[in-house]
Image (tube, helix red, strand yellow):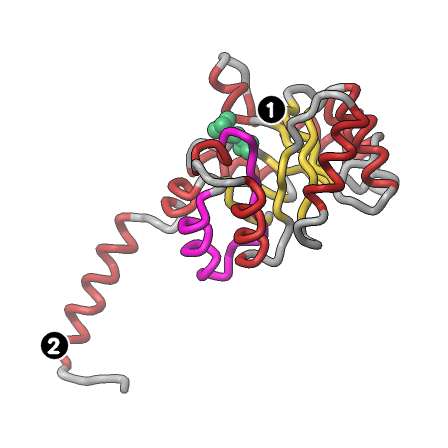
Amino acid sequence: MELFVDSADVAEIRELAETGLVAGVTTNPTLIARTGRPLFEVLEEICRLVPGPVSAEVTATDADAMVAEGRRLAAVAANIVVKLPLTWEGLKACRRLETEGIRTNVTLCFSPAQALLAARAGASYVSPFVGRLDDVGEEGMGLVADILTIFRNYRDSLRTRVLAASIRHVQHVVEAARLGADIATVPPAVLRQLVRHPLTDLGLERFLADWRKTGQRIL
Ligand code: G3P
C-alpha cells in the first residue's frame, strides 16, 4: 500500500517528503483554507516537492464548470489529479476529464454503490472516507473492504485504485493495508506516529549504551 500525505501544509509536506516515503499528496478545500494561502501558489509548491500524484479539488457543482476548473487545476503540473465529488455531476465531469487524459480522484465516497459508479465513470482513484463513517457510528473500514471485494470481481476491466481517506489513526492505516487498499492518505501527525514504538526507543537506548561501553567507533 502506498502512503500519501493528506495535507496542504507545504512545510509539513516538505519535511515528510524528505523521507522518500511519500508517494503522493491529497488536498481538499478545507485543507487549502487552513493554510490561508492562495490555492495555485500552494499547489505549485506541493507539485515541485512531490513528483507523485497531487490531488486538487474542484469547487464547482455542475459538470461543465467542474471540467473547466479541472482543466485549470491540471494545468498547474503534470502530476495534478483532479478531485471531484461523488455526485452525478462529478461523475459526468470524471468521465470527460479522464477521456481528455486528466486523471481524477472521486472523493466523498460513503457507499460501495458510489464507488462502483466512480469506477464505471473511469476514475483513476476513488476515496472512501473511513473516519467520517466511524464518526456517525458506521464501520468505515467495512466500506473499504466492500469496495475492494467488488473491484476484485472485475479486476480485468476496472483500473480505479482504492485510496483510503479520512484516516484518523495508526490502526486505520494498518487495517487499510491488511485489506489491500492501494493507497492510504494520511494526515502528517498520523504519518509520524507510524514509526513510533516504545520498544524501538528502549531497544535503541540499550544498544547505544552497550556500544558506548566498548569504547569503539564505526567511523
Ligand atoms: O482529503 C479528504 C479526507 O482525507 C478528509 O479527512 O479527517 O477531514 O475526514 P477528514
Nearer to us in this view, 190 or 123 = 123
Residue shown at 47% from the left, 17% from the top: 135
Residue shown at 61% from the left, 47% from the top: 54
Helix, strand or loop under label 1 = helix
Which image quarter: residue 112? top right
Helix, strand or loop under label 2 = helix
Nearer to us in this view, 208 or 82 = 82
- The dot on residue 142 is 1
For residue 211, side relative to residue 186 (left or right): left
Nearer to us in this view, 72 or 194 = 72
Residue shown at 77% from the left, 36% from the top: 123
List x then y, in percent, for residue 153: 81, 33
Residue 180 appears in the figure = no
Q: CA distance from mark 1 to mark 2?
A: 51 Å
List x then y, in percent, for residue 72: 71, 42
Beta carbon at label 1 within 8 Å of ligand 1: no
List x then y, in percent, for residue 136: 50, 13
Residue shown at 80% from the left, 42% from the top: 159
Residue 72 appears in the figure = yes
List x then y, in percent, for residue 13: 46, 50
Nearer to us in this view, 175 or 157 = 157
Q: Is residue 131 above or below residue 49?
A: above
- The dot on residue 117 is none
- The span shown in magenta is 9-30
Q: Would you say residue 33 sits in the magenta stretch? A: no
The crowd level at tag 1 (other Cα within 10 Å; few <14, some 14-19, many 20+) is some
Pointer 2: what residue?
213
Q: Is residue 167 above or below residue 183?
A: above
Q: Amino acid at mark 2?
A: Lys
Q: Amino acid at mark 1?
A: Gly
